[in-house]
Image (cartoon, rainbow, N blue to C red):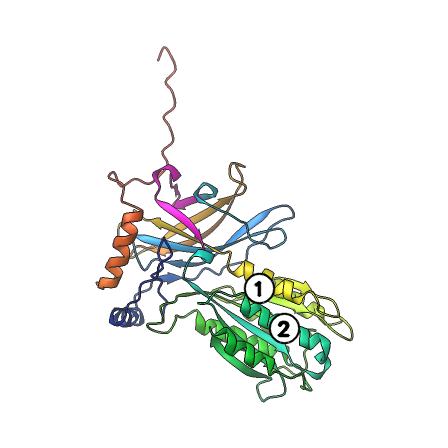
């Protein structure tokens, strides 16, 4: 089932009731509204920056919402982007920013939800002070989330699957903290790859939508791994897991917090997973005393994604059309970095809540009388004597 966003430009989300149920039925019957962009991962050269489009939502056509993540050479998000930083091209034609047909907002100020899965290595080798610091960092991550964001928790331990589900996706901070505090480091084996594979599957289910009537649209899912990276007895290999990560239709970044009381021999396993998944690898030393600062940094990254909303002037034809988004940073530098995706020009279903959302957006981005949002190159002056 496809997922649907009714979170529009000022960051409000419609509560649909029966209309939401009808909408999901429409989606289930085959109307495609969300394009998942996952072909290749962004990369910023030293001193540079990049962006990654990971979702395009055209539920409210002619309005299209593009979800993107920006990053500098240290994989940290670009801050305070506005319309002056954005270049928008539809079917090869550039939108004129002076015509005010698009806007950009940070996820931080909107109601869309994020999902994260914490994988905590609960093997005996992780016991004592480092493990207690891990639990404190996991709780700090939860304390740093927004109310609508959801967190699931897996503990790597000796079960048939190689892990224990401590919590399914949950918003309640106190319930999550209680469950995490009860985890004990008493496992004999560490099936890290099986645990990460299970988390990827959970994220895949999350990308298909939210609970009907929940009022929150889940736009991204990420994984945090607290471990020394040593795998023992997983049913899948690292190479198989890397292939699975590379082929995901929607990127799932893996943030690895590598620490060990013994030796860092297996840290490279965590580093490889993070680099292959658009995530970040953190070396947090033997005592793990940097963990709380690291998880706060990860929360900042997750909440610093942007949503570009624009009015399309492509007639409804049921076809996919090319879209490019560029970021110029800083504004006025003349250097743009682009990523591309597609959207479909389709007519939304006849549901009052959808019509109300489109009407609200139309007040914020009114249609141009001439139907031309594009930049027009000035005519060249005519030489004298001609």
Vertical arrangement, residue 343 with respect to residue 205, above or below: above
At 30% across and 71% down in the image, what residue appears?
Answer: 24
Vertical arrangement, residue 218 with respect to residue 9, above or below: below
The residue at the far right in this view is 262
For residue 277, the mark is 1
Task: For residue 274, say whether it is visible.
Answer: yes
Residue 189, percent from left and from top: 68, 85
Residue 103: say if magenta: yes
At 74% across and 70% down in the image, what residue appears?
Answer: 287
Residue 269, percent from left and from top: 68, 70
Task: For residue 314, say whether it is visible.
Answer: no
Question: Along the line of sight, which residue is nearer the eye, 329 or 343?
Answer: 329
Observer-side mark, 1 or 2, equals 2
Vertical arrangement, residue 112 with respect to residue 43, above or below: below
Q: Left or right: 139 with respect to 351?
A: right
Residue holding disc 2: 136
Cα distance in 3D space between marks 1 and 2: 26 Å
Residue 23, percent from left and from top: 28, 68
The residue at the far top in this view is 385
Q: Secondary structure at mark 1?
A: loop
Name the image quarter holding the C terminus: top left
Q: Secondary structure at mark 2?
A: helix
For residue 311, the mark is none
Magenta extent:
87-106
Vertical arrangement, residue 256 with respect to residue 167, above or below: above
Q: Residues within 10 Å of mark 2 (few under 14, many from 20)?
A: some
């Amino acid at each position: 089932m496809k997922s649907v966003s009714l979170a529009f430009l000022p960051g409000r989300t419609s509560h649909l009731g029966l209309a939401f149920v009808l909408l999901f039925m429409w989606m289930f019957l085959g109307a495609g509204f969300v394009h998942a962009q996952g072909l290749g991962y962004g990369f910023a050269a030293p001193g540079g920056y990049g962006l990654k489009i990971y979702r395009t939502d055209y539920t409210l056509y002619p309005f299209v919402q593009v979800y993107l993540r920006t990053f500098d050479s240290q994989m940290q998000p670009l801050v305070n982007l506005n319309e002056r930083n954005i270049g928008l091209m539809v079917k090869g034609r550039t939108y004129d920013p002076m015509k005010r047909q698009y806007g950009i907002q940070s996820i931080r100020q909107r109601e869309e939800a994020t999902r994260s899965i914490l994988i905590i290595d609960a093997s005996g080798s992780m016991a004592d002070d480092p493990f207690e610091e891990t639990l404190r960092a996991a709780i700090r991550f939860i304390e740093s989330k927004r109310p609508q964001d959801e967190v699931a928790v897996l503990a790597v331990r000796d079960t048939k699957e190689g892990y224990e589900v401590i919590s399914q996706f949950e918003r309640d901070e106190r319930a999550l903290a209680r469950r995490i505090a009860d985890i004990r480091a008493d496992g004999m084996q560490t099936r890290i790859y099986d645990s990460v594979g299970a988390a990827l599957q959970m994220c895949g289910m999350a990308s298909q939508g939210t609970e009907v009537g929940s009022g929150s649209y889940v736009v991204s899912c990420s994984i945090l791994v607290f471990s020394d990276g040593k795998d023992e007895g997983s049913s899948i290999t690292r190479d198989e897991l890397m292939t699975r990560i590379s082929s995901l239709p929607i990127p799932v970044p893996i943030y690895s917090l590598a620490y060990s009381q013994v030796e860092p021999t297996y840290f490279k396993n965590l580093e490889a997973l993070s680099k292959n998944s658009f995530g970040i690898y953190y070396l947090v030393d033997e005592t793990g005393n940097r963990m709380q600062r690291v998880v706060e940094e990860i929360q900042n990254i997750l909440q610093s994604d942007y949503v570009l909303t624009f009015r399309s002037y492509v007639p409804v034809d049921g076809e996919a059309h090319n879209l490019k988004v560029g970021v110029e940073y800083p504004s006025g530098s003349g250097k743009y970095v682009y990523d591309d995706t597609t959207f479909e020009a389709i007519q939304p279903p006849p549901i009052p809540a959808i019509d109300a959302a489109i009407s609200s957006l139309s007040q914020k981005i009114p249609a141009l009388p001439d139907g031309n949002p594009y930049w027009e190159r000035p005519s060249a002056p005519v030489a004298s004597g001609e």
